[in-house]
């Protein structure tokens, strides 16, 4: 509507200020060539594409509120007597870290709000990354060319966990101190160097006088610095690769369909930052989080029941709780398997999901770029493995809260622990099998819909008395959407004799690849999508409905 | 907002079909991509009154945001920071936190809601297709880069001058060692510090809560008492580090109920003293079951039987709680008869 004004040529006077500034900047930074490809960049629309945005925005919110908190927080373990305005703790001995956190919570106006926004945003950041990662996993968005960006995202998730851990340990309250003690015990279990690592981290024996200051620099500088770099890299790659999209009419592997960055996504994504910030601020207004004054300052000889880490550390807590207390003593040394095995499984659980894209691309041997997303049902084995992994993760979360499950649901703590011990091994297997079945069932349904049309719910009685349901053929848009996915053929072992008739030794890796390939794409592991011939045969008359 | 009230003249002659839509089913391949579906106009595209309503809605949201910011400032100035209010169904809240959070939340949310509503109703919603280009470079670019690299590498003579190459690798490999070295002073070496606590022969057992030395008659059957060594004050420089090892848990059992012979020998009239620090990962154990004499660590649920040498009967702990040998001094106070014989707390490599 208002474009006409801009198009009139300016014969006199100077260009508008905005244009002059842009020209000035372009002469020095070359911004026009950057803007040429990006200003009207196309973003496809799907609700699940906002999950990554939730993460990015909560990360920004965490940085903003975190900087504010550093203005008041004292990262010191010097013992002081509390004289602030929280009456129940007056006269108590506590570290300066704890007392400055009380100061922020009770004496700085808005300080409590900033603390609560910071903490809530951290929980949402981690939850957002988890869900975002699952979205990327189940739709196969990690495939070439996006494997490296998957790893960037994975590292952000792992570093986010440790940034969260070092962050909630800073107030030096009874709950977080218990968590730090757990970490120290876990480090001590490392064979040969564990004791040394612990002494170097804590500046001597636990708790010492150093860990708050050390965690502080790790929490506010080291880890967020790396994460900021990774996040920028992540975004640059998203821009460079362009966004993925689901199959549909007009959408192909060679294009990206959606709306331009300027103005639609500028407004939508920019607005979404304020929505996320607004919602988190409202949560922080009404929902209390980490009330350190209720827990009191840390003392290594005191503890409260129901001690829980923040949710994203819960699965490591589960590992440590369900593990039997194995200990091997030999030649004057102790191998603390009961703690060390969980400490080793902890990163393995994470690495398992991180390396998956490389395993799948090895199995498929597919070197093409993939920009069209899979529907989870169309990759039954991948979906099954993903759900198995999530089952393992959630089982460990249950294990991490075994005491709360026991008290809230009036169960025996021993029974809950034994359930987790068994479910850790059995649960993922069952989840895999069930998920794969469901995927195959859904594939059959899609096949049925393509060949026989949609069930209309209209029942027709034929002259001879038979009842049939009227099926309505799908539109070409729907037919295309349901048949657009690529189906792999299971790999086969190449010829075992070369061109000279000499027998070739088949390497074990090739045999494994063929086995895995048939587990992914073999006869019973995917339902062949309908072919054009099948469709034509069924729809070409013969009175078939 | 229904389409009935759109004036006739505002309706488009026909929906937009000009965007490459095939429309008819392909005879050869019914599954072929039919192309982008025709664009459907929103009500705001064809009815200026609806567009005006959207405009007013967006402006209203932005206005509410401004008012909320004013509300934030007013709350900051007007509400005392120690005032508490009751909000149903949440309960008692800090009035200032509640007001600041809600006004800030509203101010931010309304900006976001306004922008999104604006984008959805008034900005163009025509879907456009953008072409993708392969990520990998064209063959000629690839060949050029490889050739450039080979030329650069050859000109560096790195491959030919092996002596330079090897010494450079050596220097680069060694230089980070300085950084590693600098980490040495992060902490002292462990030595035997994890094997010893403050307990020694003749040290009195002091009640952690009352700060008074304990007598045998202070410890009743069924009670759980926490003790620390005499001379360890909360104000001591190393209180936290010392109590992390020396914390003690005292219970009185019927001597006849004590199954372990050494435990009985190290007790005094059925009073036994065990380390309070869990042998799993070091949480203080604090849940005592009088009837069974079991103690449970609230962190990871390791369970120990205090009537049987504090052996592990459930959970992830790997070994029994260390026992402190106690007796009574000449004035009738409980005292330690030495340090723990084994390291307290979590197991470690050198523990043995």
Image (tube, coloured by chain):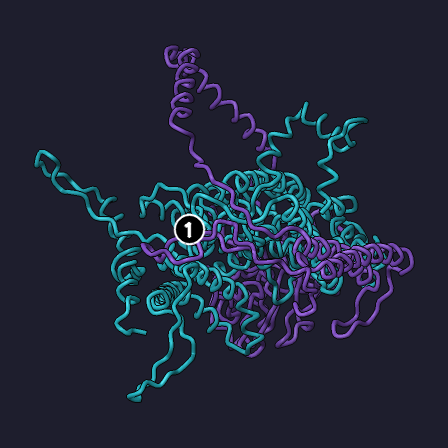
Chain colours: A cyan, B purple
Can residue A77 be seen in this snapshot? yes
| In this view, B137 is above or below B267 | above
Q: Farthest residue toward the left?
A: A501
What residue sits 59% from the left and 29% below the top? B182
**Viewer-proximal residue, A542 or A484?**
A542
Residue A354 appearing in the image: no
Examine the rendered structure and indicate whether residue B180 appears above or below residue A274. above
Q: Residue at x 67, y 64 (%)?
A: B8
Say whether residue B8 is left or right of residue B154.
right
Query: In the picture, which quadrant includes the N terminus of chain B?
Result: bottom right
Where does residue A368 sit, x and y in percent of width and height?
37, 42
* Rendered image quadrant of residue A138: bottom left
> Which is more toward the observer, B122 or A103?
B122
Q: Residue at x 52, y 54 (%)?
A: B17
Of residues A256 and B40, the one nearer the viewer is B40
- x, y percentage for residue A134? 49, 55
Residue B200, percent from left and from top: 62, 53
User: Considering the numbered disc 1 on the image, is that residue within a helix, a strand or a loop?
Assistant: helix
Q: On what subunit does the disc labeled 1 rest?
A: A
Q: Quadrant of residue A35?
A: top right
Crowd around label 1: few <14 · some 14–19 · many ≥20 (10 Å): few
Please give left or right for residue B139 compared with residue A72 in the image.
left
Tally the numbered discs: 1
Residue at numbered disc 1:
A352
- The residue positioned farthest toward the bottom in the image shown: A465
* Image x and y of residue A518, in percent: 26, 54
């Amino acid at each position: 509507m208002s474009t006409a004004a801009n198009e009139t040529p300016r014969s006199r006077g100077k260009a508008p200020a905005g244009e002059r500034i842009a020209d000035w900047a372009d002469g020095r930074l070359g911004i026009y060539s950057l803007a040429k490809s990006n200003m009207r960049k196309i973003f496809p629309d799907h609700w699940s594409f906002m999950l990554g945005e939730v993460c990015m925005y909560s990360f920004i919110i965490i940085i903003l509120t975190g900087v504010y908190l550093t203005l008041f927080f004292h990262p010191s373990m010097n013992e002081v007597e509390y004289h602030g305005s929280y009456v129940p703790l007056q006269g108590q001995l506590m570290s300066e870290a704890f007392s400055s956190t009380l100061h922020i919570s009770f004496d700085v106006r808005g300080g409590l709000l900033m603390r609560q926004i910071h903490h809530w945003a951290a929980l949402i950041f981690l939850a957002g990354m988890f869900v975002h990662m699952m979205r990327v996993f189940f739709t196969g968005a990690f495939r070439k060319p996006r494997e490296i960006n998957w790893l960037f995202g994975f590292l952000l998730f792992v570093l986010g966990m440790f940034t969260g851990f070092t962050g909630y340990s800073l107030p030096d309250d009874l709950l977080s101190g218990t968590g730090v003690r757990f970490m120290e015990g876990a480090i001590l279990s490392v064979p040969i160097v564990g004791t040394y690592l612990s002494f170097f981290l804590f500046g001597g024996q636990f708790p010492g006088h150093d860990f708050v200051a050390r965690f502080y620099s790790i929490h506010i500088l080291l880890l967020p610095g790396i994460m900021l770099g990774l996040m920028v890299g992540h975004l640059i790659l998203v821009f460079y690769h362009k966004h993925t999209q689901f199959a549909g009419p007009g959408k192909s592997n060679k294009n990206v369909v959606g709306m331009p960055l300027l103005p639609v996504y500028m407004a939508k994504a920019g607005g979404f930052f304020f929505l996320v910030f607004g919602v988190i601020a409202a949560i922080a207004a009404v929902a209390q989080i980490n009330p350190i004054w209720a827990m009191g300052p840390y003392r290594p000889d005191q503890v409260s029941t129901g001690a829980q880490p923040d949710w994203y550390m819960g699965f490591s807590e589960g590992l440590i709780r369900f593990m039997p207390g194995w200990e091997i003593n030999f030649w004057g040394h102790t191998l603390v398997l009961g703690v060390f095995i969980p400490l080793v499984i902890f990163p393995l659980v994470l690495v398992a999901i991180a390396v998956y894209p490389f395993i799948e691309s090895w199995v498929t041997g597919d070197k093409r770029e993939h920009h069209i997303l899979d529907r989870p049902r169309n990759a039954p084995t991948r979906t099954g493995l993903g759900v198995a992994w999530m089952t393992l993760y959630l089982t460990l979360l249950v294990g991490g809260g075994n005491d709360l499950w026991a008290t809230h649901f009036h169960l025996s703590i021993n029974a809950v622990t034994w359930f987790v011990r068994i479910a850790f091994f059995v649960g993922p297997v069952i989840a895999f099998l069930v998920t794969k079945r469901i995927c195959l069932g859904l594939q059959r349904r899609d096949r049925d819909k393509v060949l026989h049309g949609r069930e209309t719910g209209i029942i027709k009685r034929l002259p001879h008395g038979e009842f049939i349901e009227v099926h309505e053929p799908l539109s070409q848009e729907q037919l295309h959407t349901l048949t657009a996915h690529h189906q792999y053929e299971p790999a086969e072992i190449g010829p075992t004799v070369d061109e000279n008739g000499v027998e070739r030794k088949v390497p074990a890796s090739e045999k494994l690849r063929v086995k895995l390939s048939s587990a992914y794409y073999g006869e019973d592991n995917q339902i062949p999508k309908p072919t054009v011939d099948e469709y034509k045969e069924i729809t070409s008359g013969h009175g078939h409905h | 907002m229904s389409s009935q009230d759109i004036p006739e003249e505002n309706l488009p002659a026909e929906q937009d079909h000009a965007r490459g839509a095939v429309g008819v089913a392909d005879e050869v391949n019914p599954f072929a991509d039919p192309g982008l579906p025709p664009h459907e106009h929103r009500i705001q595209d064809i009815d200026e009154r609806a567009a005006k309503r959207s405009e007013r809605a967006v402006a209203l949201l932005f206005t509410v945001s401004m008012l909320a910011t004013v509300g934030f400032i007013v709350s900051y100035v007007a509400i005392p920071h120690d005032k508490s209010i009751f909000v149903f169904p949440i309960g008692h809240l800090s009035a200032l936190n509640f007001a600041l959070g809600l006004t800030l939340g509203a101010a931010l949310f309304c900006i976001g809601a306004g922008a999104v509503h604006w984008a959805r109703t008034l900005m163009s919603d025509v879907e456009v297709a953008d072409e993708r280009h392969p990520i990998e470079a064209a063959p000629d670019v690839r060949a050029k880069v490889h050739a450039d690299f080979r030329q650069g590498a050859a000109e560096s003579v790195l491959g030919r001058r092996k002596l330079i190459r090897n010494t450079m690798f050596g220097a680069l490999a060694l230089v980070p060692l300085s950084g590693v070295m600098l980490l040495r002073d992060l902490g002292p070496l462990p030595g035997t510090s994890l094997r010893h606590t403050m307990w020694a022969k003749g040290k009195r057992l002091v009640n952690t809560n009352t700060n008074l030395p304990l007598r045998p008659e202070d410890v009743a059957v069924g009670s759980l008492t926490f003790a620390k060594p005499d001379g360890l004050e909360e104000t001591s420089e190393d209180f936290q580090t010392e109590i992390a090892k020396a914390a003690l848990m005292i219970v009185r059992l019927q001597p006849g109920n004590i199954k372990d012979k050494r435990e009985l020998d190290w007790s005094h009239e059925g009073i036994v003293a065990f380390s309070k620090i869990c042998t799993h990962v070091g949480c203080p154990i604090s849940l005592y079951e009088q009837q069974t004499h079991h103690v449970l660590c609230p962190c990871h649920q390791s369970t120990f039987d205090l009537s049987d040498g504090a052996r592990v009967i459930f959970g992830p702990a790997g070994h029994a709680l260390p026992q402190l040998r106690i007796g009574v001094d000449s004035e009738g106070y409980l005292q330690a008869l030495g340090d723990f014989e084994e390291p307290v707390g979590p197991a470690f490599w050198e523990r043995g």
